[in-house]
Image (spheres, grey):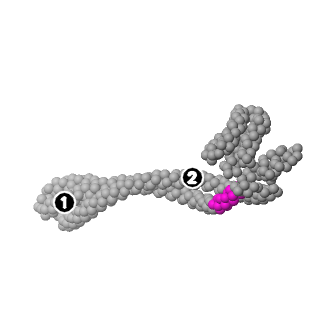
Amino acid sequence: MTILGNDSSRARGPYTKVVHKTAQGLKALIRLVERASRQLHGQVETIQDSSNLIAQQVEGVTHTIREITAGIQDSAEHIQDAAAQMQHIQGLLEQIRRDNGAVVAASGEVSAAVGEGKREIADAAAQMRRMTTESAQLHEEMAQLKQALAQIVDITRIVEQVSGLTQLLALNANIEAARAGEHGKGFAVVAQEISRLAQQSKQATGLVGEHVRTVSASAQTLASSIEAMKQTADAGAFVMDAGFERYEQVESFLAGLCGSIETVDESLLGVTGSVHAISDVVHRTSAMFEQVAAGSEEVLASAEMQQRGIVQMNAGIREAGRSSLTLRSAVSQFKLPEAAKTHPLHEAIDGWMERAIGIRAVMVSMIEAREAGRIRYWHEEKTLAEAELSKAFARLGELCRLPGDQERLAELQAAWESFAEAKERNARWMLDGEYEKARQGLVNIGRARFKRALDLAQGWLDG
């Protein structure tokens, strides 16, 4: 299909000028559409490549997040196991501390018992030493008794006195034996025997002579017994002194042991506190891991949702690519003038027309919007598009050297300023919420003034 060129103006007929004008407008639009479709197809291909790359990256990120989520969940389980183990250890340490406290108490009781035993054995040793002294005294008295027995034959007259003295000595011996307790039982027997002999002596003074030898033998036996008792008491005192020293060693050892156990108890108290603190940290870490695991699952779900969205976006991009190819195929059915036959400023004018149509498209989108946020968004887009259009005007001003081109540029600027006045009014109405006024302004005054500017640009190209 061939769009009418300048030669078509030679045709005759009542609708020739209208058809010619319409054809020129279509030619400009088709040229812009062809250029835009070519750019669109290139951008779609670029976006598709980028989208494919993003899809691969998102798939890799999703796989990584999935592995991280599994690792976090596994770590959370291990942390929970560690928390249970720490709690068990804490229970064991508390039990050990209680047992150690019982040992401390028992050690204190044993130490007290050892101290009491030390005092008792010291008392027993003192008694043994007293028995040794008393045995020595008895030994001396027995020596005196021997002398008395040797003289008894000659001094029978004093038998009564000796008997009385012997009874007194027996009484003292009984008292000392009672003081000696278990250790004085043997001595008490001897004392009783002496008392009995003294009584017999008192009753049978006449038989003294006959019994002197018996008394002497008994006295010798008694002396031997006293000597043996003295030796036994000395040995007992020595053993008790050695036992006292061992009691002191045991008491010192128990004191050190109690101190060590108390130190261990304090250390256990510190360790128990540290384990309790560690257990709290492990529990908090476990809770944090659970939160992180839940968050990672949410991130994974979001990543998977994004992946599905990207897959859908890729499908949309592929569909857009096919649509752009269809558009290019449709536009290629029209035969446009060759580049050599077009206006020298056609690229700059086409660039201006593209930006002007872009502003018109932004205004249409703004008029169709009803949410305040979307209206402000399209208003910002309008400002950006107007800046690009100003650059296109500046470019045309730089390229216009001929007076005719300068005149057409001035006409185009005036027409655009007229459209800009209606455009700004429509934008204010949209920002103020007067949607119907803005819509009417767009389809009436705005459309007419925009068409006027585009017709001037097309006429400039055709001139």
Residue 313 in sight in this render: no
Closer to us: 323 or 302: 323
Q: Which amino acid, by three-letter code, is at mark 2?
A: Met
- Tell me where residue 335 appears, x and y as whole percent: 78, 57
- The CA distance from mark 2 to mark 1 is 88 Å
Query: Magenta stretch: dominant SS?
Result: helix
Q: Is residue 263 above or below residue 362?
A: below
- Tell me where residue 115 appears, x and y as whole percent: 33, 54
- Tell me where residue 409 appears, x and y as whole percent: 67, 42
Residue 440 in sight in this render: yes
Give the residue displayed 61% in from the left and 46% down from the top.
398
Give the SS element for disc 1: helix
Q: Circle 2: is it few (<14), some (14-19), or many (20+) Cα within 10 Å?
A: few
Q: Circle 1: is it few (<14), some (14-19), or many (20+) Cα within 10 Å?
A: some
Return the residue at label 2.
Answer: 288
Q: Which mark is residue 136?
A: 1
Left or right placement of residue 274 versus residue 116 in this view: right
- The part of the chain drawn in magenta is 40-58
Q: Which mark is residue 169?
A: none
Judge whether residue 54 is colored magenta. yes
Give the SS element for disc 2: helix
Left or right placement of residue 331 versus residue 410 in this view: right
Q: Is residue 110 above or below residue 430?
A: below
Judge whether residue 293 is colored magenta. no
Q: Which amino acid, by three-letter code, is at mark 1?
A: Ala
Q: Is residue 435 above or below residue 202?
A: above
Left or right placement of residue 441 versus residue 116 in this view: right
